[in-house]
Image (cartoon, rainbow, N blue to C red):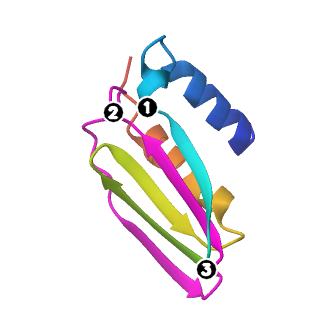
Amino acid sequence: MSIINWLEKWYESNCNGDWEHTFGVAISTLDNPGWHVQFNVIETIYEDVIFDDVIIERTDNDWVHCKKIEGNVECAGGPKNLGEMLEIIKKWMDKNKPVK
């Protein structure tokens, strides 16, 4: 499954008629240049799950910082690190998925 397909599936799985009106996912650009990704996990199964900060510094254009702030998993990274940021969030969610 591609990371975009995973993102679509995750978003759809949280849409319940209410959640999507207040919460969601935002992807935007930074001016240094780079990407900013925000996953709002309030009212999801990940709301109370600990997220260990990720700091990767390779070069001025190849870097990733991810942390959880007030119910949001937020990542910022270089211009070619968008997929890597989404993979970091996916890996955290996969690792912390409740056992059914």
The disc placed on residue 47 is none
Q: How far apart are marks 3 and 1 (CA)?
A: 27 Å
For marks 3 and 1, the one nearer the N-term is 1
Residue type at the position of mark 1: Phe
- Residue type at mark 3 is Asn
Q: In this view, does 87 lie above or below 11?
A: below
Q: Is mark 3 on a helix, strand or loop?
A: loop
User: Which residue reaches farthest bottom?
Assistant: 59
Q: Which of marks 3 and 2 is nearer the N terminus?
A: 3
- The residue that appears at 65% across and 35% down in the rendered structure is 6
Range of magenta residues: 32-61
The residue lying toward the viewer, choosing from 73 and 100, is: 73
* Magenta span includes 52: yes
Circle 3 packing at 10 Å, graded few (<14), some (14-19), many (20+), is: few
Q: Nearer the viewer, residue 22 or 65?
A: 22
Q: Where is residue 97 in the image (x, y as percent from the top left)?
A: 41, 32
What residue do we see at 51% from left, 83% from top?
Answer: 57
Which residue is under mark 2?
42
Going by the numbered disc 2, the residue's amino acid type is Ile
Front: mark 2 or 1: 1
Q: Are marks 3 and 1 in contact (CB under 8 Å)?
A: no
Percent of width and height locating residue 1: 74, 36
Circle 1 is placed at which residue position?
A: 23
Which of disc 1 and disc 2 is earlier in sequence?
1
- Which residue, given by chain and number where applicable, does mark 3 sit on? 32
Residue positioned most to the top: 17
